[in-house]
Amino acid sequence: MLTVMNLKAREVLDSLGRPTVEVEVAASNGEVGWAIVPSGASMGRHEAIELRDTDSRRHGGRGVRRAVENVAREIAPALRGMDLEDQAAIDAKLIALDGTPNKSRLGANAVLGASLAVARAAAVARGEELYVHLNRLWRQRLDPGESAVPTLPMPMVTMISGGQHAGAQRDFQDFLSIPVGASTYTEALEMTTALYRAVGAILKAKGLEADLVGDEGGYGPHLRTNAQAVDLLLEAVLACGWEPGRDVAIALDIAASHFHDPETGRYRLTTAGDDELDSAGMAAMLVHWANLYPIVSIEDGLAEDDWDGWVALTARLGERIQLIGDDLFTTRVERLREGIHRRAANAILIKPNQVGTLTETFDTLLLARRHGYRTIISARLGETEDPTIADLAVATAAGQIKIGSVARSERLVKYNRLLRIEERLGPDAAFVGRAALGL
Ligand code: PGA
Ligand code: ZN
């Protein structure tokens, strides 16, 4: 039996130049697996807690030395000698050791780093690709009749950023494209990079800042309205010779929690000209946009605790388009269960660091799948050279992936990893394409 021999952690930097946790796990046969934890900017209130040092003399208080220490002092001794391939037992041990509902004692960054590094160590120790190992773990969770074929995801890619992801354009966080006409992952990626270049050329031709990119690599131009971003995207689709909606569709990440005032329950838009809207007004605006544009997916169209608004929005748009809960669900089974019960949203963004272990990520994926909620594996704003989410998306046949834009290497390590997996899977590599969105 392969066992955990040791764990080591260190503070490294993410794509925003902020500290994050890297964990290495040594297997009993001497092989080593590693993981680096990402970090969000527009974080949901219900996320697991990243432990930060709050020592203002280092990294503006964002150091993670306490989390690193927790790996060495508490997690390493607790996991040593455990079966490396029994991810469920390892994660149960981590959860019990932390002892809080939101990983706030050891830190979700320490716990997730350990959990993911164990999975990679097991794959390396067996001489296997990570997605193969993750697919085996995933299969163990499924019933005998349920399909577990590794499947390449449809990418949902940021073209223009606003909100907390770029300074210049105020309200909506991301304007994304989905190459729904693609029949392979490679083709999807090629269409996306062509569109990215076309958007850049159009911005330049209009005298808008095509050189300014947001933290995820999306363009960050100063625009007068949110609608202008969609118009620019559509213009780029046409410039590529494609039909909007048939070849490339539009997706929005509104990230509405971040301009919602919980005191008054109102949404404070600054660029739409509508200034303040109540929940029904926001929903009406989104319905209007969905009627006007080839939009197939809207993420966090309403705030994280506006359940009634979500239910009403889902009743109006849920049959037609994908409504993703990110801040709404924060990858947690309890939140998703509530959403299923109330019929809020019809899809869920999956971010392992919102919940803190691989096993809990599987729990949420499984619940979503069994209730017909679509799943989108997602990166964070603060990313790293760790490509694990690419393997996770394939292993669990999640259907869709959201990594940011097609620029900056912390994004491209994941896109490129998917190219390599596609090659390994060979000519029969499964790709669900537009069906991932129910189209
Ligand atoms: P975050 O952004 O990493 O800042 O949370 C990603 C998203 O909102 O989807
Ligand atoms: Zn989001």
Image (tube, grey):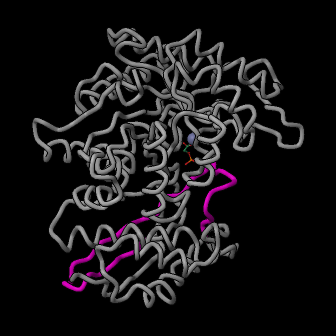
Foreground pick, 56 / 248: 248
Q: Farthest left residue?
A: 427
Which residue: 25% across, 62% down?
133
Q: Is residue 398 left or right of residue 18?
A: left
Residue 140 position in % (x across, y down): 30, 60
Rendered image quadrant of residue 103: bottom right
Q: Is residue 32 magenta?
A: yes
Instruction: Give the residue drawn at x 73%, y 23%.
Output: 271
- Which part of the image, by quadrant, shows the C terminus? top left
Residue 351: x %, y % from top left: 49, 52
Q: Residue at x 62, y 15 (%)?
A: 289
- The answer to if 101 sits in the magenta stretch is no
Residue nearer the viewer, 252 or 10 = 252
Magenta part, dominant SS: loop
Depth order, front residue of 373/45? 373
The x and y percentages for residue 65 are 56, 79
Percent coordinates x, y for residue 362 in the rendering: 42, 56
Question: In the rendered image, which quarter contains the N terminus?
Answer: bottom left
Count of residue discs: 0
Residue 386 lies, with reference to residue 199, above or below; the image says: below
Q: Does 252 sit above or below residue 128?
A: above
- Specify the quadrant of the image occupied by residue 63: bottom right
Ligand 2 occupies quarter: top right
Image point (78%, 17%), residue name: 273
Residue situated furthest right in the rendering: 264
Please provide the residue range marked out in magenta: 22-51
